[in-house]
Image (cartoon, grey):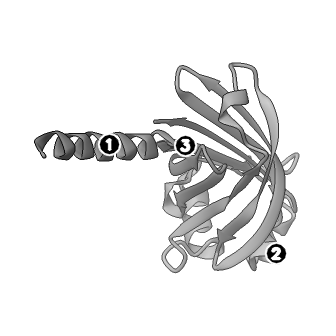
Amino acid sequence: MKTRITLLVILLCSLSTLQAQGRYVTKSGEIQFEASVPSFEEVKAKNSGVSAILKSETGEFAALALVKGFRFKVALMEEHFNENYIESSKYPKSTFKGKIKGFDISGLSASKKEYLFVGTINLHGEAKEIEVPAMISLVDDCVTVSLEFVLKPEEFNIKIPKIVSSKIAEDINVVAVFSLKK
């Protein structure tokens, strides 16, 4: 009887370990965006405290960024971003959820491999479906996921006042990099 109980405990422990092995996480992912226009002040920000999780068995991926975590070179620009455009007190977070199509962790190496990320970005209370290339590599049990894509403020019901609209690009270039570990 003791042998059966011991075997059952060992089996349950090994199953929970196997389940946890398929999750890669980070709390220090990075998202940068740029909306600069030539001849005007740089409109660029970075958030280096983005949380993300990747389920290696399914390719499911999710990221969460606190909007107030974006840092600009100019404090006044950061203030306008949070109060006037993004309204971070009303919409404090942005999410990025979806699936990496055809994802297979066993096929990863130090060389970047291209996959297609299909999912939804939620920002400013609006959701947008996206399909963007994802470059993924694996080095020493660390999966690196890199994404580059373009967003438009109007897609998220973000109003840019006419007085500054010529100083902000219509296309917002976004770069996201996540180094996820078991």
Across and down, in percent, residue 92 comes to 50, 71
Q: Which mark is residue 29?
A: 3
Crowd band around label 3 with a 10 angstrom C-alpha radius: few (<14), some (14–19), many (20+): many
Report which residue position mark 2 lands on: 154
Please name the residue that numbered disc 1 is placed on: 11
Q: Are the two marked residues, 1 and 2, in contact with CB atoms closer than 8 angstroms? A: no
Other-residue count near label 2 (Cα within 10 Å), few / some / many at <14 / 14–19 / ≥20: few
Q: Residue at x 48, y 41 (%)?
A: 28
| 116 or 19: nearer the viewer | 19
Q: Earlier in the sequence, mark 2 or mark 3?
A: 3
Residue 24 visible here: yes
Q: CA distance from mark 1 to mark 2?
A: 53 Å
Instruction: Provide residue 4's location: percent of width, then percent of height.
Output: 20, 44
| Residue 164, quarter of the rendered image | bottom right
| Res. 160 in view | no
Give whichever of discs 1 and 2 has the lower sequence position: 1
CA distance separating discs 3 and 1: 35 Å
Question: Measured from the top left, where is residue 171 in percent x and y?
Answer: 86, 58
